[in-house]
Amino acid sequence: SSSSPVSLGFGQSGETEEVQEELVLKPFPTSVSISPALLENLVYDALVWSSLNGLVVGDKSVKRSGTSPGVGMVHAPFALLPMPIQEGFWKQACELAPIFNELVDRVSLDGKFLQDSLSRTKKVDAFTSRLLDIHSKMLEINKKEVIRLGLHRSDYMLDAETALLYQIELNTISSSFAGLGCLVSNLHRHLLNQHGKDLGLNPKRVPGNTAVRQFAEALAKAWKEYDNKRAVVMFVVQPEERNMYDQHWLSFLLKEIYPVLLIFSSFTIIGGQIVAVVYFRAGYSPNDYPSESEWNARLMMEQSTAIKCPSISYHLVGTKKIQQELAKPLVLERFLEDEDAAKLRKCFAGLWSLDDSEIVKTAIERPELFVLKPQREGGGNNIYGDDVKEMLLKLQHEKNQEQAAYILMQRIFPTASLSYLIREGICHQNNAISELGIYGAYLRNNDKVIMNDHCGYLMRTKDSSSNEGGVATGTPVFHDILLH
Ligand code: ADP
Ligand code: MG
Ligand code: MG
Protein backbone atom coordinates (compact mmCIF):
# COMPACT_ATOMS: atom_id res chain seq x y z
CA SER A 1 0.00 0.00 0.00
CA SER A 2 1.15 3.54 -0.68
CA SER A 3 1.85 6.12 1.99
CA SER A 4 -0.37 8.89 0.72
CA PRO A 5 -4.13 8.71 1.27
CA VAL A 6 -5.98 7.36 -1.72
CA SER A 7 -8.93 9.17 -3.11
CA LEU A 8 -11.90 6.99 -3.97
CA GLY A 9 -15.01 7.72 -5.94
CA PHE A 10 -17.36 7.12 -3.06
CA GLY A 11 -20.17 9.46 -2.35
CA GLN A 12 -21.58 10.81 0.84
CA SER A 13 -24.80 8.97 1.52
CA GLY A 14 -27.35 11.43 0.25
CA GLU A 15 -31.09 11.42 0.22
CA THR A 16 -32.87 8.67 -1.66
CA GLU A 17 -33.68 9.39 -5.24
CA GLU A 18 -36.93 8.58 -6.91
CA VAL A 19 -36.84 6.32 -9.93
CA GLN A 20 -36.79 8.54 -12.96
CA GLU A 21 -37.90 7.81 -16.45
CA GLU A 22 -34.42 8.16 -17.87
CA LEU A 23 -31.54 7.44 -15.60
CA VAL A 24 -28.28 9.21 -16.05
CA LEU A 25 -24.94 8.38 -14.60
CA LYS A 26 -24.05 11.06 -12.14
CA PRO A 27 -20.67 11.60 -10.59
CA PHE A 28 -20.59 10.85 -6.90
CA PRO A 29 -20.81 14.08 -4.94
CA THR A 30 -17.66 13.67 -2.89
CA SER A 31 -14.79 11.29 -2.54
CA VAL A 32 -13.34 9.84 0.61
CA SER A 33 -9.74 9.46 1.57
CA ILE A 34 -8.45 6.41 3.33
CA SER A 35 -5.28 6.74 5.28
CA PRO A 36 -2.93 3.75 5.24
CA ALA A 37 -3.66 3.16 8.93
CA LEU A 38 -7.42 3.07 8.37
CA LEU A 39 -6.97 0.82 5.36
CA GLU A 40 -4.93 -1.63 7.39
CA ASN A 41 -7.60 -1.66 10.09
CA LEU A 42 -10.39 -2.23 7.61
CA VAL A 43 -8.62 -5.10 5.90
CA TYR A 44 -7.79 -6.76 9.20
CA ASP A 45 -11.36 -6.41 10.50
CA ALA A 46 -12.77 -7.71 7.24
CA LEU A 47 -10.56 -10.79 7.27
CA VAL A 48 -11.45 -11.58 10.88
CA TRP A 49 -15.15 -11.09 10.17
CA SER A 50 -15.03 -13.39 7.12
CA SER A 51 -13.34 -16.15 9.07
CA LEU A 52 -15.74 -15.93 11.99
CA ASN A 53 -18.84 -15.78 9.82
CA GLY A 54 -18.24 -18.39 7.17
CA LEU A 55 -17.52 -16.14 4.22
CA VAL A 56 -15.22 -18.90 3.00
CA VAL A 57 -14.40 -21.17 0.09
CA GLY A 58 -12.19 -24.23 -0.25
CA ASP A 59 -8.51 -23.37 -0.53
CA LYS A 60 -7.25 -24.92 -3.74
CA SER A 61 -3.80 -25.48 -2.28
CA VAL A 62 -5.30 -27.95 0.20
CA LYS A 63 -6.08 -31.31 -1.33
CA ARG A 64 -9.29 -32.27 0.49
CA SER A 65 -10.74 -28.75 0.53
CA GLY A 66 -13.22 -29.60 -2.22
CA THR A 67 -14.56 -32.76 -0.61
CA SER A 68 -14.32 -32.43 3.14
CA PRO A 69 -16.10 -29.58 4.92
CA GLY A 70 -13.96 -27.94 7.57
CA VAL A 71 -10.72 -28.75 5.78
CA GLY A 72 -8.64 -26.09 4.03
CA MET A 73 -10.80 -22.98 4.09
CA VAL A 74 -9.82 -19.53 2.89
CA HIS A 75 -11.91 -16.35 2.94
CA ALA A 76 -13.85 -15.77 -0.27
CA PRO A 77 -12.27 -12.99 -2.33
CA PHE A 78 -14.07 -9.71 -1.72
CA ALA A 79 -13.97 -5.99 -2.30
CA LEU A 80 -13.36 -3.98 0.83
CA LEU A 81 -16.04 -1.33 0.43
CA PRO A 82 -19.44 -1.34 -1.25
CA MET A 83 -19.87 0.10 -4.70
CA PRO A 84 -22.10 3.14 -5.08
CA ILE A 85 -24.97 2.63 -7.49
CA GLN A 86 -27.89 4.89 -8.22
CA GLU A 87 -31.01 3.59 -6.59
CA GLY A 88 -32.94 3.86 -9.84
CA PHE A 89 -30.81 1.19 -11.53
CA TRP A 90 -31.18 -1.05 -8.56
CA LYS A 91 -34.96 -0.70 -8.57
CA GLN A 92 -35.11 -1.24 -12.31
CA ALA A 93 -33.16 -4.50 -12.02
CA CYS A 94 -35.36 -5.68 -9.13
CA GLU A 95 -38.51 -4.85 -11.05
CA LEU A 96 -37.38 -6.99 -13.99
CA ALA A 97 -36.88 -10.15 -11.92
CA PRO A 98 -40.53 -11.26 -11.63
CA ILE A 99 -41.04 -10.55 -15.33
CA PHE A 100 -38.05 -12.72 -16.24
CA ASN A 101 -39.38 -15.41 -13.89
CA GLU A 102 -42.69 -15.36 -15.71
CA LEU A 103 -40.97 -15.33 -19.09
CA VAL A 104 -38.92 -18.42 -18.25
CA ASP A 105 -42.06 -20.23 -17.18
CA ARG A 106 -44.00 -19.36 -20.33
CA VAL A 107 -41.15 -20.14 -22.71
CA SER A 108 -40.59 -23.46 -20.91
CA LEU A 109 -44.11 -24.52 -21.87
CA ASP A 110 -43.42 -23.97 -25.57
CA GLY A 111 -41.50 -27.14 -26.35
CA LYS A 112 -41.58 -26.48 -30.07
CA PHE A 113 -40.04 -23.02 -29.69
CA LEU A 114 -37.18 -24.50 -27.65
CA GLN A 115 -36.57 -27.39 -30.04
CA ASP A 116 -36.78 -25.21 -33.16
CA SER A 117 -34.57 -22.44 -31.80
CA LEU A 118 -31.88 -24.90 -30.78
CA SER A 119 -32.20 -27.31 -33.71
CA ARG A 120 -29.10 -26.11 -35.55
CA THR A 121 -27.06 -25.71 -32.38
CA LYS A 122 -27.98 -29.31 -31.60
CA LYS A 123 -26.17 -30.53 -34.71
CA VAL A 124 -22.84 -29.05 -33.70
CA ASP A 125 -22.88 -28.94 -29.91
CA ALA A 126 -22.87 -32.37 -28.29
CA PHE A 127 -23.77 -31.07 -24.83
CA THR A 128 -26.79 -29.05 -25.97
CA SER A 129 -27.77 -32.04 -28.07
CA ARG A 130 -27.89 -34.33 -25.02
CA LEU A 131 -30.02 -31.82 -23.13
CA LEU A 132 -32.37 -31.54 -26.09
CA ASP A 133 -32.64 -35.33 -26.28
CA ILE A 134 -33.93 -35.42 -22.72
CA HIS A 135 -36.31 -32.61 -23.57
CA SER A 136 -37.57 -34.49 -26.68
CA LYS A 137 -38.20 -37.61 -24.62
CA MET A 138 -40.32 -35.58 -22.21
CA LEU A 139 -42.28 -34.11 -25.11
CA GLU A 140 -42.84 -37.61 -26.53
CA ILE A 141 -44.32 -38.95 -23.31
CA ASN A 142 -46.21 -35.69 -22.89
CA LYS A 143 -44.67 -35.12 -19.47
CA LYS A 144 -46.21 -32.19 -17.63
CA GLU A 145 -44.47 -30.43 -14.77
CA VAL A 146 -47.39 -29.33 -12.62
CA ILE A 147 -45.27 -27.81 -9.85
CA ARG A 148 -42.53 -25.62 -11.26
CA LEU A 149 -39.69 -24.07 -9.31
CA GLY A 150 -37.20 -21.57 -10.70
CA LEU A 151 -34.26 -20.12 -8.78
CA HIS A 152 -32.73 -17.74 -11.27
CA ARG A 153 -30.19 -14.97 -11.38
CA SER A 154 -30.24 -12.25 -14.00
CA ASP A 155 -26.88 -10.51 -14.39
CA TYR A 156 -26.41 -6.91 -15.53
CA MET A 157 -23.74 -4.41 -16.33
CA LEU A 158 -24.17 -0.68 -16.43
CA ASP A 159 -22.92 0.66 -19.75
CA ALA A 160 -20.85 3.79 -19.18
CA GLU A 161 -21.52 5.47 -22.49
CA THR A 162 -25.29 5.09 -22.70
CA ALA A 163 -25.96 4.95 -18.94
CA LEU A 164 -28.20 1.96 -19.56
CA LEU A 165 -28.51 -1.22 -17.60
CA TYR A 166 -27.86 -4.20 -19.89
CA GLN A 167 -28.54 -7.81 -19.16
CA ILE A 168 -25.49 -10.01 -19.55
CA GLU A 169 -27.33 -13.30 -19.16
CA LEU A 170 -30.07 -15.09 -17.28
CA ASN A 171 -29.03 -18.12 -15.24
CA THR A 172 -31.73 -20.73 -14.76
CA ILE A 173 -29.53 -23.55 -13.43
CA SER A 174 -27.22 -23.58 -10.41
CA SER A 175 -27.56 -19.82 -9.82
CA SER A 176 -24.92 -19.67 -7.17
CA PHE A 177 -23.56 -17.36 -4.46
CA ALA A 178 -26.83 -16.44 -2.77
CA GLY A 179 -25.22 -17.61 0.48
CA LEU A 180 -21.84 -15.91 0.19
CA GLY A 181 -23.35 -12.81 -1.45
CA CYS A 182 -25.54 -12.21 1.59
CA LEU A 183 -22.53 -12.56 3.86
CA VAL A 184 -20.67 -9.90 1.91
CA SER A 185 -23.57 -7.49 2.52
CA ASN A 186 -23.33 -8.26 6.22
CA LEU A 187 -19.57 -7.78 6.12
CA HIS A 188 -19.88 -4.38 4.50
CA ARG A 189 -22.57 -3.27 6.90
CA HIS A 190 -20.33 -4.36 9.75
CA LEU A 191 -17.36 -2.43 8.37
CA LEU A 192 -19.44 0.70 7.82
CA ASN A 193 -20.93 0.42 11.28
CA GLN A 194 -17.40 0.42 12.65
CA HIS A 195 -15.72 2.87 10.31
CA GLY A 196 -18.53 4.53 8.36
CA LYS A 197 -18.01 7.91 10.02
CA ASP A 198 -14.36 8.01 8.98
CA LEU A 199 -15.28 6.93 5.49
CA GLY A 200 -18.33 9.16 5.14
CA LEU A 201 -20.42 6.13 4.19
CA ASN A 202 -23.79 5.28 5.69
CA PRO A 203 -24.26 1.57 6.50
CA LYS A 204 -28.02 1.98 6.08
CA ARG A 205 -27.49 2.52 2.36
CA VAL A 206 -26.27 -1.05 1.92
CA PRO A 207 -29.54 -2.78 1.05
CA GLY A 208 -30.51 -5.85 3.03
CA ASN A 209 -29.71 -8.98 1.07
CA THR A 210 -32.34 -11.67 1.51
CA ALA A 211 -31.22 -13.93 -1.35
CA VAL A 212 -30.30 -17.03 0.59
CA ARG A 213 -33.28 -16.83 2.95
CA GLN A 214 -35.73 -16.45 0.09
CA PHE A 215 -34.14 -19.27 -1.90
CA ALA A 216 -34.48 -21.47 1.19
CA GLU A 217 -38.08 -20.38 1.50
CA ALA A 218 -38.79 -21.21 -2.15
CA LEU A 219 -37.27 -24.68 -1.77
CA ALA A 220 -39.26 -25.27 1.41
CA LYS A 221 -42.49 -24.12 -0.18
CA ALA A 222 -41.87 -26.39 -3.16
CA TRP A 223 -41.30 -29.28 -0.78
CA LYS A 224 -44.58 -28.44 0.91
CA GLU A 225 -46.46 -28.38 -2.39
CA TYR A 226 -45.16 -31.87 -3.14
CA ASP A 227 -47.03 -32.87 -0.04
CA ASN A 228 -45.21 -35.92 1.22
CA LYS A 229 -43.68 -35.56 4.69
CA ARG A 230 -41.23 -38.42 4.08
CA ALA A 231 -39.86 -36.99 0.85
CA VAL A 232 -36.51 -35.23 0.83
CA VAL A 233 -34.98 -32.22 -0.85
CA MET A 234 -31.95 -33.40 -2.79
CA PHE A 235 -29.04 -31.09 -3.65
CA VAL A 236 -27.25 -32.56 -6.65
CA VAL A 237 -23.67 -31.36 -6.38
CA GLN A 238 -20.32 -31.97 -8.00
CA PRO A 239 -18.19 -34.63 -6.30
CA GLU A 240 -15.55 -31.98 -5.68
CA GLU A 241 -16.75 -28.46 -4.93
CA ARG A 242 -14.73 -25.60 -3.47
CA ASN A 243 -17.82 -23.48 -3.38
CA MET A 244 -19.49 -25.92 -0.98
CA TYR A 245 -19.99 -23.38 1.80
CA ASP A 246 -22.25 -21.29 -0.40
CA GLN A 247 -24.37 -24.42 -0.91
CA HIS A 248 -24.21 -25.29 2.78
CA TRP A 249 -25.46 -21.84 3.75
CA LEU A 250 -28.59 -22.50 1.71
CA SER A 251 -29.11 -26.02 3.03
CA PHE A 252 -28.38 -24.91 6.57
CA LEU A 253 -31.01 -22.17 6.43
CA LEU A 254 -33.50 -24.51 4.84
CA LYS A 255 -33.07 -27.04 7.68
CA GLU A 256 -32.91 -24.37 10.35
CA ILE A 257 -36.19 -22.69 9.48
CA TYR A 258 -38.20 -25.58 8.07
CA PRO A 259 -38.56 -29.25 9.00
CA VAL A 260 -37.26 -30.39 5.63
CA LEU A 261 -35.20 -33.53 5.15
CA LEU A 262 -32.25 -32.73 2.98
CA ILE A 263 -29.54 -34.77 1.34
CA PHE A 264 -26.48 -33.91 -0.70
CA SER A 265 -25.80 -36.23 -3.57
CA SER A 266 -23.75 -36.46 -6.73
CA PHE A 267 -25.28 -37.69 -9.98
CA THR A 268 -23.95 -41.18 -9.39
CA ILE A 269 -24.95 -41.82 -5.80
CA ILE A 270 -28.70 -41.78 -5.79
CA GLY A 271 -31.38 -44.05 -4.46
CA GLY A 272 -33.50 -45.29 -1.65
CA GLN A 273 -35.49 -42.19 -0.87
CA ILE A 274 -38.53 -40.42 -2.20
CA VAL A 275 -37.42 -37.07 -3.53
CA ALA A 276 -39.72 -34.05 -3.45
CA VAL A 277 -37.30 -31.51 -4.94
CA VAL A 278 -34.15 -32.07 -7.00
CA TYR A 279 -32.04 -28.94 -6.74
CA PHE A 280 -29.21 -28.90 -9.27
CA ARG A 281 -25.92 -27.36 -8.28
CA ALA A 282 -24.30 -29.57 -10.90
CA GLY A 283 -25.31 -30.61 -14.37
CA TYR A 284 -24.79 -27.27 -16.14
CA SER A 285 -21.45 -28.23 -17.66
CA PRO A 286 -20.27 -31.14 -19.86
CA ASN A 287 -17.70 -31.91 -17.15
CA ASP A 288 -20.57 -32.93 -14.89
CA TYR A 289 -21.36 -35.84 -17.22
CA PRO A 290 -18.11 -37.83 -17.53
CA SER A 291 -20.01 -41.01 -18.42
CA GLU A 292 -23.41 -42.32 -19.50
CA SER A 293 -24.41 -42.96 -15.92
CA GLU A 294 -24.67 -39.21 -15.18
CA TRP A 295 -26.84 -38.71 -18.25
CA ASN A 296 -29.00 -41.66 -17.21
CA ALA A 297 -29.37 -40.15 -13.77
CA ARG A 298 -30.38 -36.79 -15.24
CA LEU A 299 -32.95 -38.50 -17.47
CA MET A 300 -34.31 -40.52 -14.57
CA MET A 301 -34.72 -37.37 -12.48
CA GLU A 302 -36.52 -35.66 -15.33
CA GLN A 303 -38.89 -38.60 -15.75
CA SER A 304 -39.65 -38.72 -12.05
CA THR A 305 -42.46 -36.94 -10.26
CA ALA A 306 -39.96 -34.87 -8.26
CA ILE A 307 -39.97 -31.11 -8.70
CA LYS A 308 -36.86 -30.24 -10.68
CA CYS A 309 -35.02 -27.01 -10.08
CA PRO A 310 -34.57 -26.55 -12.92
CA SER A 311 -36.58 -28.83 -15.18
CA ILE A 312 -34.94 -29.59 -18.52
CA SER A 313 -37.16 -26.93 -20.12
CA TYR A 314 -36.17 -24.27 -17.59
CA HIS A 315 -32.54 -25.27 -18.12
CA LEU A 316 -32.83 -24.81 -21.90
CA VAL A 317 -34.55 -21.43 -21.57
CA GLY A 318 -31.36 -20.23 -19.86
CA THR A 319 -29.10 -21.04 -22.82
CA LYS A 320 -27.38 -18.21 -24.63
CA LYS A 321 -28.99 -19.25 -27.90
CA ILE A 322 -32.46 -18.78 -26.42
CA GLN A 323 -31.41 -15.43 -24.97
CA GLN A 324 -30.49 -14.39 -28.51
CA GLU A 325 -33.72 -15.79 -30.02
CA LEU A 326 -35.80 -13.93 -27.44
CA ALA A 327 -34.07 -10.71 -28.42
CA LYS A 328 -35.34 -10.93 -32.00
CA PRO A 329 -38.15 -8.54 -32.89
CA LEU A 330 -41.62 -9.59 -31.71
CA VAL A 331 -40.50 -12.80 -30.02
CA LEU A 332 -40.86 -11.55 -26.45
CA GLU A 333 -44.33 -10.34 -27.32
CA ARG A 334 -45.36 -13.92 -28.03
CA PHE A 335 -44.82 -14.75 -24.38
CA LEU A 336 -45.52 -11.54 -22.47
CA GLU A 337 -47.89 -8.63 -22.40
CA ASP A 338 -46.53 -5.69 -24.42
CA GLU A 339 -45.79 -3.56 -21.40
CA ASP A 340 -43.68 -6.26 -19.75
CA ALA A 341 -41.97 -7.11 -23.01
CA ALA A 342 -40.98 -3.47 -23.41
CA LYS A 343 -39.45 -3.37 -19.93
CA LEU A 344 -37.32 -6.42 -20.65
CA ARG A 345 -36.32 -5.27 -24.11
CA LYS A 346 -34.94 -2.06 -22.65
CA CYS A 347 -32.19 -4.06 -20.95
CA PHE A 348 -31.33 -6.24 -23.95
CA ALA A 349 -27.94 -5.57 -25.47
CA GLY A 350 -27.26 -6.37 -29.12
CA LEU A 351 -27.50 -10.14 -29.63
CA TRP A 352 -27.01 -11.88 -32.95
CA SER A 353 -26.87 -15.27 -34.53
CA LEU A 354 -23.81 -15.89 -36.70
CA ASP A 355 -26.12 -16.26 -39.71
CA ASP A 356 -26.19 -12.49 -39.80
CA SER A 357 -23.33 -11.92 -42.25
CA GLU A 358 -23.39 -8.14 -41.84
CA ILE A 359 -22.77 -8.33 -38.11
CA VAL A 360 -20.12 -11.03 -38.54
CA LYS A 361 -18.34 -8.72 -40.94
CA THR A 362 -18.51 -5.85 -38.44
CA ALA A 363 -17.28 -8.12 -35.65
CA ILE A 364 -14.30 -9.19 -37.72
CA GLU A 365 -13.45 -5.53 -38.30
CA ARG A 366 -14.09 -4.40 -34.70
CA PRO A 367 -13.78 -7.54 -32.52
CA GLU A 368 -13.23 -5.48 -29.36
CA LEU A 369 -16.87 -4.39 -29.48
CA PHE A 370 -18.22 -7.95 -29.25
CA VAL A 371 -18.23 -11.07 -27.13
CA LEU A 372 -18.50 -14.46 -28.83
CA LYS A 373 -20.37 -16.97 -26.68
CA PRO A 374 -20.76 -20.74 -26.91
CA GLN A 375 -23.58 -22.61 -25.13
CA ARG A 376 -21.77 -22.95 -21.83
CA GLU A 377 -22.16 -21.89 -18.21
CA GLY A 378 -19.89 -21.24 -15.28
CA GLY A 379 -17.47 -18.66 -16.62
CA GLY A 380 -14.31 -18.88 -18.67
CA ASN A 381 -15.94 -19.99 -21.93
CA ASN A 382 -16.45 -16.77 -23.88
CA ILE A 383 -14.20 -15.34 -26.54
CA TYR A 384 -12.96 -11.72 -26.58
CA GLY A 385 -10.86 -9.30 -28.57
CA ASP A 386 -8.66 -10.61 -31.39
CA ASP A 387 -9.76 -14.17 -30.61
CA VAL A 388 -13.26 -13.16 -31.75
CA LYS A 389 -11.88 -12.20 -35.13
CA GLU A 390 -9.79 -15.34 -35.43
CA MET A 391 -12.66 -17.61 -34.49
CA LEU A 392 -15.10 -15.90 -36.84
CA LEU A 393 -12.65 -16.19 -39.73
CA LYS A 394 -12.07 -19.83 -38.90
CA LEU A 395 -15.81 -20.54 -38.81
CA GLN A 396 -16.32 -18.74 -42.13
CA HIS A 397 -13.47 -20.67 -43.71
CA GLU A 398 -14.63 -24.09 -42.55
CA LYS A 399 -18.12 -23.62 -43.99
CA ASN A 400 -19.64 -26.26 -41.71
CA GLN A 401 -22.50 -25.60 -39.35
CA GLU A 402 -20.16 -24.97 -36.44
CA GLN A 403 -21.21 -21.31 -36.19
CA ALA A 404 -24.59 -22.41 -34.83
CA ALA A 405 -22.80 -23.28 -31.59
CA TYR A 406 -22.16 -19.57 -30.91
CA ILE A 407 -23.91 -16.27 -30.54
CA LEU A 408 -22.45 -12.78 -30.82
CA MET A 409 -23.16 -10.19 -28.18
CA GLN A 410 -22.48 -6.50 -27.98
CA ARG A 411 -19.73 -5.92 -25.47
CA ILE A 412 -20.71 -3.76 -22.51
CA PHE A 413 -18.19 -1.36 -21.03
CA PRO A 414 -18.97 -0.34 -17.46
CA THR A 415 -17.20 2.59 -15.84
CA ALA A 416 -14.09 1.40 -14.08
CA SER A 417 -13.45 2.67 -10.58
CA LEU A 418 -10.64 2.29 -8.12
CA SER A 419 -11.40 -0.55 -5.72
CA TYR A 420 -9.68 -2.49 -2.99
CA LEU A 421 -9.84 -6.16 -3.90
CA ILE A 422 -8.81 -8.68 -1.27
CA ARG A 423 -7.64 -12.15 -2.20
CA GLU A 424 -5.94 -14.63 0.11
CA GLY A 425 -5.49 -11.98 2.75
CA ILE A 426 -3.76 -9.52 0.46
CA CYS A 427 -5.28 -6.20 -0.56
CA HIS A 428 -4.72 -4.94 -4.10
CA GLN A 429 -5.90 -1.65 -5.43
CA ASN A 430 -7.27 -1.99 -8.94
CA ASN A 431 -9.35 -0.27 -11.51
CA ALA A 432 -12.37 -2.51 -11.48
CA ILE A 433 -15.73 -3.05 -13.13
CA SER A 434 -18.82 -4.61 -11.62
CA GLU A 435 -21.66 -6.92 -12.57
CA LEU A 436 -24.91 -6.90 -10.63
CA GLY A 437 -26.96 -10.07 -10.34
CA ILE A 438 -30.55 -10.04 -9.12
CA TYR A 439 -31.96 -13.33 -7.87
CA GLY A 440 -35.48 -14.36 -8.69
CA ALA A 441 -37.61 -17.12 -7.21
CA TYR A 442 -40.66 -18.55 -8.93
CA LEU A 443 -42.93 -21.29 -7.71
CA ARG A 444 -46.21 -22.32 -9.15
CA ASN A 445 -48.53 -25.24 -8.75
CA ASN A 446 -50.72 -25.56 -11.80
CA ASP A 447 -52.61 -22.27 -12.08
CA LYS A 448 -51.54 -20.99 -8.71
CA VAL A 449 -48.44 -18.78 -8.58
CA ILE A 450 -47.12 -19.27 -5.07
CA MET A 451 -44.01 -17.17 -5.35
CA ASN A 452 -42.77 -14.72 -7.95
CA ASP A 453 -40.28 -12.38 -6.37
CA HIS A 454 -36.98 -10.69 -6.80
CA CYS A 455 -34.86 -11.79 -3.92
CA GLY A 456 -31.59 -10.22 -3.07
CA TYR A 457 -28.56 -9.63 -5.17
CA LEU A 458 -24.99 -10.48 -5.99
CA MET A 459 -22.41 -7.92 -6.91
CA ARG A 460 -19.17 -9.12 -8.45
CA THR A 461 -16.18 -7.01 -9.36
CA LYS A 462 -13.12 -7.77 -11.41
CA ASP A 463 -10.04 -5.99 -12.68
CA SER A 464 -11.12 -3.91 -15.63
CA SER A 465 -8.39 -5.57 -17.70
CA SER A 466 -9.73 -9.10 -17.25
CA ASN A 467 -12.40 -10.47 -19.54
CA GLU A 468 -14.31 -13.10 -17.62
CA GLY A 469 -16.44 -12.86 -14.57
CA GLY A 470 -17.42 -16.11 -12.85
CA VAL A 471 -16.12 -15.84 -9.27
CA ALA A 472 -15.36 -19.56 -9.43
CA THR A 473 -12.83 -18.99 -12.21
CA GLY A 474 -10.63 -16.95 -9.91
CA THR A 475 -10.56 -13.39 -11.21
CA PRO A 476 -13.54 -11.51 -9.79
CA VAL A 477 -14.35 -10.88 -6.17
CA PHE A 478 -17.56 -10.57 -4.18
CA HIS A 479 -18.76 -7.06 -3.83
CA ASP A 480 -21.74 -5.14 -2.59
CA ILE A 481 -23.66 -2.03 -3.36
CA LEU A 482 -24.27 1.27 -1.69
CA LEU A 483 -27.42 3.01 -2.87
CA HIS A 484 -27.32 6.70 -3.56
P1 ADP B 1 -21.47 -17.63 -17.94
O1 ADP B 1 -22.77 -18.33 -18.11
O2 ADP B 1 -20.30 -18.50 -18.22
O3 ADP B 1 -21.38 -16.91 -16.64
P2 ADP B 1 -21.68 -14.97 -19.13
O4 ADP B 1 -22.48 -14.65 -20.33
O5 ADP B 1 -22.22 -14.49 -17.84
O6 ADP B 1 -21.43 -16.56 -19.12
O7 ADP B 1 -20.23 -14.41 -19.34
C1 ADP B 1 -19.23 -14.56 -18.36
C2 ADP B 1 -18.62 -13.22 -18.02
O8 ADP B 1 -18.14 -12.57 -19.19
C3 ADP B 1 -19.60 -12.24 -17.41
O9 ADP B 1 -19.69 -12.41 -16.02
C4 ADP B 1 -18.98 -10.90 -17.80
O10 ADP B 1 -17.94 -10.53 -16.90
C5 ADP B 1 -18.36 -11.20 -19.14
N1 ADP B 1 -19.30 -10.81 -20.21
C6 ADP B 1 -20.23 -11.61 -20.76
N2 ADP B 1 -20.95 -10.95 -21.70
C7 ADP B 1 -20.45 -9.70 -21.74
C8 ADP B 1 -20.75 -8.53 -22.51
N3 ADP B 1 -21.71 -8.53 -23.42
N4 ADP B 1 -20.02 -7.41 -22.29
C9 ADP B 1 -19.04 -7.41 -21.37
N5 ADP B 1 -18.71 -8.46 -20.62
C10 ADP B 1 -19.39 -9.61 -20.79
MG1 MG C 1 -24.39 -18.32 -16.79
MG1 MG D 1 -22.51 -15.33 -16.02
Image (tube, rainbow, N blue to C red):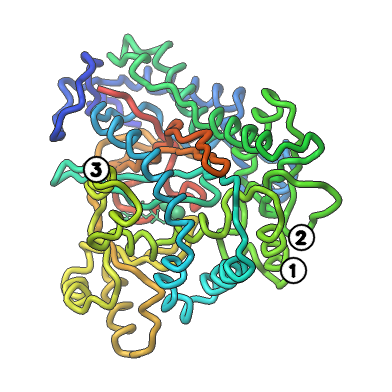
Q: Secondary structure at mark 2?
A: loop
**Residue 48, image quadrant:** top right
Residue located at (49% from left, 38% from top): 441
Q: Secondary structure at mark 3?
A: helix
Question: Mark 3 is on which residue type?
Answer: Glu
- Residue 231 sits above or below residue 132 on the image: above
Name the disc covering residue 219, or none.
Answer: none
**Mark 3 crowdedness (10 Å alpha carbons): few <14, some 14-19, many ≥20:** few
Q: Position of residue 130 (x, y in %)?
A: 58, 72
Q: Secondary structure at mark 1?
A: helix
- Residue 137 sits above or below residue 252 on the image: below
Q: Is there a contact, CB below 8 Å, between mark 2 and mark 3? A: no
Question: Mark 1 is on which residue type?
Answer: Ser
- Residue 195 sits above or below residue 375 on the image: above
Q: Position of residue 223 (x, y in %)?
A: 68, 37
Sequence order check, earlier mark of 2 and 3: 2
* Residue picked out by circle 1: 293
Q: Is residue 87 left or right of 265 when viewed as pictured?
A: left
Name the disc covering residue 268, or none.
Answer: 2
Viewer-nearest of discs 1 and 3:
3
Let me know if residue 380 appears in the view.
Answer: no
Q: Quadrant of the N terminus?
A: top left
Sequence order check, earlier mark of 1 and 3: 1
Alpha carbon of mark 1 to alpha carbon of mark 3: how far? 45 Å
* Residue picked out by circle 3: 339
Residue located at (33% from left, 67% from top): 372
Of 108 and 219, which appears nearest the observer?
108
Alpha carbon of mark 2 to alpha carbon of mark 3: how far? 45 Å
